[in-house]
Amino acid sequence: MHIGEIATCPISLGGRITIAVIANPDLSSYYEDDGIVLLLDSRTGEEIDVQGSGRWTASNLCTVTAGDTILLAGGCKDGTVELREPWTGDQVRVLRGHRGQIVKVCQVEANGSPLLASASLDGTIRLWDPANGDHIRTFQADDHRPGSLCAIGTGAGSMLASFSGREIRLWDPANDRNMRTLEGHSGDFCALCAVKDDDLFLLASGETEVDQVYINRGDVDEDAADYTIRLWNPASGEQVRIFEGHSAPVNSICSFSIRNRYLLASASDDKTVRLWNPMSRAPVLTIPVHYSAKSIMWGNDSLFVGLDNGALAIKLEPSQCSYSA
């Protein structure tokens, strides 16, 4: 069973913290078809039975706050975004407006209110009010077809980061302004995540692959992908540092803290998960996982890794994550 996407579901049921995963039994069709959304007990890994509509399908997931309720948002191949009640699978509402497959969804704040952002292959990013389903605004990305999306805190608010065409674009969710463009990766696909360390709000980007279109045009060499992770200051556009070590595409990255120390985790097709000190280039820990690691997230004091053959929970001890300040 291929686990393609992992999202936190921070709702306690009998003291259990739950994770949501997208599972697809056919690895060859993962990037073409929606997968089944499952809820897993984060402590045991067992699937949790839901009592309502049951299983549903999506291509990517996130949690979103709608009033006093936490919902699961699922981006789908048909261009819709479904909002579901996590514990029952019951559909709350469907967001329509995109004309292409949804490649990423994430929560972002604008003017102090939580909104849902959806990136589509139609070349747009749309913002929605998850509480009522209203469409707030659209970012027209033109030839920039976003393949990844994340929200970044800035201290004064937040911004959206999207990646496509070897560049990262930063957007102001309070209006439709493209704030700046970051360039440096040679690949056409990139994983993104926000990183916070003390008073710094940073953006991490991990390279996945070089698009064949650029190779055919002669824009880049076939071996151009260096599978690096790059740390950016979104406020200034400055590239802060580069992390090297992976030997295959970096499919997913996440940031977390353990005993007040911030760490960056990366999942790669080189069958490893790596931990990094975001304030230096030094690797902290390399964990062999024996299968291609497709997604990664932190929750309940563990790293949850989506693999070609299932999901893996890695319990980390503080002593494993120590580094010089």
Image (cartoon, rainbow, N blue to C red):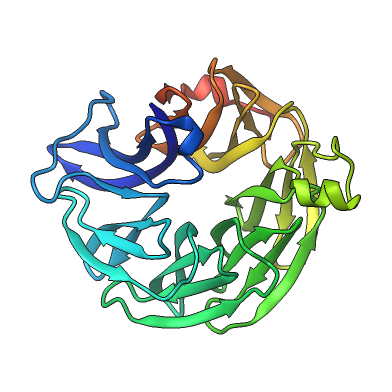
Q: How many marks?
A: 0
What quarter of the picture does the C terminus occupy?
A: top right
The spot of residue 283 in percent (x, y) is 70, 27
Q: Residue at x 35, y 35 (%)?
A: 300
Q: Nearer the viewer, residue 29 or 115?
A: 29
Task: Give left or right: position of 128 versus 276.
Answer: left
- Percent coordinates x, y for residue 297 in the rendering: 46, 39
Residue at 27% across, 74% down? 131
Q: Position of residue 75 (x, y in %)?
A: 40, 58
113 relative position to 271: left or right: left
Q: Nearer the viewer, residue 64 or 57?
A: 57
Q: Quadrant of residue 246?
A: top right
Quadrant that contains the N terminus: top left
Where is residue 248 drawn, in percent x and y?
Answer: 70, 29
Q: Nearer the viewer, residue 279 or 161?
A: 161
On the question of residue 166 being in view, the answer is yes
Identify the residue at horizontal 80%, vertical 39% (top origin). 225
Classify 30 as above or below 317.
Answer: below
Q: Is residue 70 above or below residue 27?
A: below
Foreground residue, 252 or 59?
59
The answer to whether one can see residue 237 in this image is: no
* Residue appearing at x 40%, y 61% in the figure: 78
Residue 278 lies, with reference to residue 324, above or below; the image says: below
